[in-house]
Amino acid sequence: MSPRALAPVLAMLTALFAPVFALAQMSAAEMAAMLQRMDDRQRNMGDYKALAYIEQREKNKNDVFFETVFYRRDKSEQFLILFLKPRTEAGKGYLRIEKNLWMYDPGTGKWERRTERERIGGTNSRSQDFDPLYLARDFTHEYVGAEKLGNFEVHHLRLKAKPGAKSPDPVIEMWIDKATENNLKQQDFALSGRLMRTSYYPKWDKVFSETKKAEVYYPKEIRIFDEVEKENRTTILIDTVDLRPLEPNVFTKAWLEAKSR
Amino acid sequence: MGTVILIGLRNLRQGGRRTVLLGLALALVTLLLVLLDALAAGLETSMLRSATTLSSGHVNVGGFFKVSSGQASPTLAEGKRIREIVEREVEGRDYVVDRLRGWARAVSETSSSWFALAGVDVAEERGLREVLQITQGRLEDLAQADTVMLFEAQAKRLEARIGDTLTLSAPTMGGVNNTVDVRVVAIARDVGWMSAISLFMPKSTVRSLYQMKPEATGAVQIYLDDPERGAAVIEQLKPVFEREGFRIMESDPRPFWMKFEAVAGQDWVNQKLDLTTWKEEVSFLLWILTGFSALRWSLLGVLLVVIVVGIMNAMFMSIRERTREIGTMRAIGMSRRAVQWLFLVEALGLGVLASVVGAACGAGTALLINAAHIQIPNEAFQAILMNDVLLLALEPMNVLVAIAVITLVTCVAAVAPARRAARLRPVGAIHQVG
């Protein structure tokens, strides 16, 4: 059968399955709305405090375990993470002031400016793992397809960072649970197109926020796999989320230095 | 005075075994001094060679470009123009190259490590081609895009061979993650410790990794006819660049890859130039020279104290044995000063003779060691000595200084015994028994 003869057949098949494709696809507006909902429900209108346990496994190295507490003030995009354990790291912290991330080392008493892609405590985690990106605001989106991720029906989206976005990854792909709209899997790509990290979010939880008068969602567990150095992996457990207002001076160098003492 | 010298030298000859043993000790210390000097000079030569091959010219015009105040990239956005200024202004240069700089993680199938990247045009890198000893592959293949040259220790650490692919990962100048896959085309013999951290590749690869414009570079490296003129050239270039509208960073004697955090912490954006000499680029290794120098002088100090005590003891014994002779010479009219000179001439003769013999033996030993191309078996020693072959750089001035120092020390050690001999009373000395 010649290609010309195939054309009407293909046209007929396309017409026949068009409603199915339409169901599987999401419109740009629907995607934007979904991403906006995801952004909104992960953010509190007021303050946010939680414990985070970070475990790092690297090839030919001893496993590293950190106990940290992190603070967010979503309204002003402020962020702070303070290391509690092990004792050698206690008092160390990262603080975002405006668009700059600063690291404090109580050993030297010095502050050093770091970038947003800084590996927190030398692990494969970054500040974005504790302080989610603004998906709707900072990314353009493209629908890859409706897929199955294990037992979950998911939307597979490809997001490209807009110029000036604070994401260190120019492209990310997300697998979003259709039922709950929780992000279940995320892949971060380098500019070259190389896959850098795959993160899984197997457990989500929510707490009611008095300030927001709604629930705030957070991943209870994040499993990050380094796709460049395949045997490196990081696990983050988030616990004891507290949405009560924080002291006004929490997001200052002086406060972190005082805590370190 | 002629008589005094004659008597002094005769006494030296008559000293017999004592003179020979003292002379031998002095010759050995001189030999040691010459060899240690040659080793220190060899170390500095290796450091200069290693630094100027791997990471630095005799003078470097590098700098940082900051897109935002917290984000520093070791880049000269107007690299082409800066090179033109250098070529126009610097006299007494041997040649000029420009290299792209970076700091990235290299990942192999089994391992990973952080490296200082050097993007080079291998065709214009005369010094690099002369110094590197390629053990596998071809250096010329580094002209092909997305290739890399490893040093043996790096290849071992990454478990990489010719033809293998490594992934280089680093953020671009705009701050987003990027990677480049590079193919290993050459493996070179290690050039001391610095070769452990320097990774060579074509300029286009570094440009692609950092998303840099074609006119940008990392540093313009100037090789001078006289490397010691580095500081003077910097002083000459600073006002030139300022006139051309460039800002200059404050002097910070560290290699560029140790300045990232400090620069990222400073509140400025756009371009600033950083002018450094090769010594500043290897300042983190100068502790080796300082430590070696301290060790050398401590060892020599101890040996010289032993020598001084030995000489004084031998002289006092000599005076005791020759008391009647001294008394007689004083009685027939020799002045106190002449007696003093007699012993000083004796010491001077011993010092000159022994140190010349020692220096000659030391120089000969150094030449033999160099000719033998003795391989340093231990990697740690290779790293400290910055070479895989034991290199002793013999400098005539150092040999002359060694002879002068040993002779002077011998003479100084003889001053007290000579003064005692001069103070002897003729009558008492003549009647001395035993």
Image (cartoon, rainbow, N blue to C red):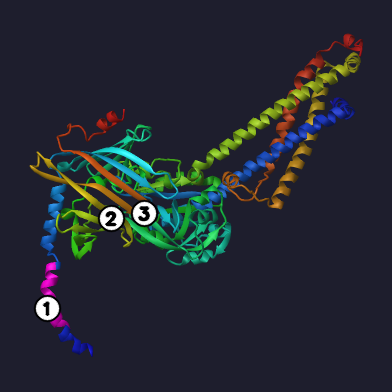
Q: CA distance from mark 1 to mark 3?
A: 48 Å
The amino acid pointed to by label 3 is Ala
Sequence-first tag of 2 and 1: 1
Q: Determine which quarter of the picture holds residue B28.
A: top right
Q: To which residue does mark 3 refer?
A: B170
Residue B349 can be seen in this image: no
Other residues around mark 3 within 10 Å, as few (<14) / some (14–19) / many (≥20) = many
Question: Which subunit holds the residue at mark 2?
Answer: A
Residue A22 magenta-highlighted: yes
Magenta part mainly helix, strand or loop?
A: helix
The quadrant in which the C terminus of chain B is found is top right
Q: Residue B116 in the image: x percent, y percent?
A: 44, 51
Question: Which residues are drawn in magenta?
Answer: A10-23
Q: CA distance from mark 2 to mark 1?
A: 39 Å
Question: Which subunit holds the residue at mark 1?
Answer: A
Direction from residue A164 to residue A91 in the image, left or right: right
Q: Residue at x 45, y 48 (%)?
A: A60
- State the residue in front, B326 or A34: A34
In the rendered structure, find residue A16 and report the number of the disc placed on it: 1
Q: Determine which quarter of the picture holds residue A73.
A: top left
Q: Residue B388 in the image: x percent, y percent?
A: 61, 50
Helix, strand or loop under label 2: loop
Q: Determine which quarter of the picture holds residue A23.
A: bottom left
Q: To which residue does mark 2 refer?
A: A169
Contact check, label 1 and label 3, Cβ < 8 Å: no
Q: CA distance from mark 3 to mark 2?
A: 11 Å
The amino acid pointed to by label 2 is Asp
Helix, strand or loop under label 1: helix
Question: Considering only vertical position in the picture, is B142 above or below B337?
Answer: below
